Image (tube, rainbow, N blue to C red):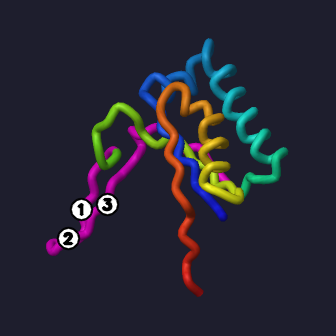
Amino acid sequence: MQYTILCYETAADFARRSDPAEAGPYWAGWSAYGATLAQAGVFVSGAGLLPPAGAVTVRVGPKGRTVQDGPFAEVKEQLGGFFVIEVDSLEAALDWAAKAPSSASGSTEVRPVLAMPG
């Protein structure tokens, strides 16, 4: 079964991405995690996301479309990226999620992937 690992990061994590002193270790952690998923044969896909300042939220209501700059909610942690993995059980997915760098500094959510009909 496929699971999505949603990696939530703090503002400090997003800042580390471009800090000359911290970017190397930050990206090395994520590269190692992705490589470990691939070597184990569970990696399906994944991507990092740009910081939340570049997010745009779209809603459609009775008056049509509204667009709001920024993410939907003001929270301490924002979605920083995701991985889709293929494993046999939720427990296995949770084990992989626990190894994500976001689990140590932010949080990591696991959701089963819904197979679309057709």
Prevailing secondary structure class for the magenta stretch in the rendered image:
strand
* Residue of label 3: 58
Residue 97: in magenta span: no
Numbered disc 3: secondary structure = strand
| Residue 30 vertical placement versus 23 (above, below) | below
Task: Name which quarter of the figure residue 117 lies in.
Answer: bottom right
Task: Name which quarter of the figure residue 73 lies in.
Answer: top left
Query: In the rendered view of the protein, which quadrant contains the N terminus?
Result: bottom right
Task: Indicate the position of residue 93 as horizontal and vertical percent values.
Answer: 63, 50
Q: Is residue 50 visible?
A: no
* Residue of label 2: 61
State left or right for residue 51 relative to residue 46: left
Q: Amino acid at mark 1?
A: Thr
CB-based contact (under 8 Å), mark 2 and mark 1: yes
| Tag in front: 2 or 1 | 2
Task: Name which quarter of the figure residue 22 lies in.
Answer: top right
Of pointers 1 and 3, the one earlier in the residue sequence: 3
Task: Indicate the position of residue 55 as horizontal and vertical percent values.
Answer: 40, 47
Front position in the image: 103 or 32: 103
Numbered disc 1: secondary structure = strand
Quote the CA–CA distance across marks 2 and 1: 8 Å
Q: Amino acid at mark 3?
A: Val
Q: Residue at x 42, y 27 (%)?
A: 11
* Residue of label 1: 66
Residue 57: in magenta span: yes
Q: Amino acid at mark 2?
A: Gly
State left or right for residue 88 relative to residue 52: right
Quote the CA–CA distance across marks 2 and 3: 10 Å
Q: Around disc 2, counting alpha carbons within 10 Å, would you say few (fewer than 14), some (14 to 19), or many (20 or more)?
A: few
Q: Residue at x 71, y 36 (%)?
A: 33
> What are the residue bounds of the magenta stretch?
45-70
Query: What numbered label is drawn on residue 110?
Result: none
